[in-house]
């Protein structure tokens, strides 16, 4: 993503990263914390 430098795209990127992290943590087979 080369447009993450832009405010809106950067914000969307952060939101997407947050969701992806939440999914990864929820799907982790072992203790995520």
Image: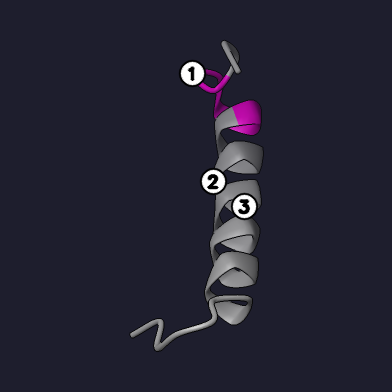
Q: Residues within 10 Å of mark 2 (few under 14, many from 20)?
A: few
**Figure check: 29 above or below 7:** below
- The image quadrant that residue 30 belongs to is bottom left
Please tell me which residue is depicted at 54% across the width and 62% down the height of the picture. 21
Q: Residues within 10 Å of mark 3 (few under 14, many from 20)?
A: few
The reply to whether the C-beta atoms of the residues labelled 3 and 2 are less than 8 Å apart is: yes
- Circle 3 sits in a helix, a strand or a loop, which is it? helix
Please tell me which residue is depicted at 55% across the width and 28% down the height of the picture. 7
- Please say whether residue 6 is one of the residues in the magenta stretch: yes
Cα gap from disc 1 to disc 3, whole angstroms = 14 Å
- The image quadrant that residue 27 belongs to is bottom right
Q: Which mark is residue 16?
A: none
Q: Quadrant of the C terminus?
A: bottom left
* Residue 9: x %, y % from top left: 64, 28
Ranked by sequence position, the earlier of labels 2 and 1 is 1
Circle 1 residue: 5
The reply to whether the C-beta atoms of the residues labelled 1 and 3 are less than 8 Å apart is: no
**Viewer-side residue, 7 vs 31:** 31
Circle 3 residue: 15
The reply to whether the C-beta atoms of the residues labelled 2 and 1 are less than 8 Å apart is: no
* Residue 4: x %, y % from top left: 54, 23
What range is drawn magenta here? 4-9
Q: How is the image coloured?
A: one colour
Circle 2 residue: 14
Cα gap from disc 2 to disc 1, whole angstroms = 11 Å
């Amino acid at each position: 993503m080369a447009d993450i430098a832009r405010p809106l795209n950067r914000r969307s990127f952060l939101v997407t990263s947050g969701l992806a992290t939440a999914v990864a943590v929820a799907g982790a087979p072992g203790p995520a914390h």
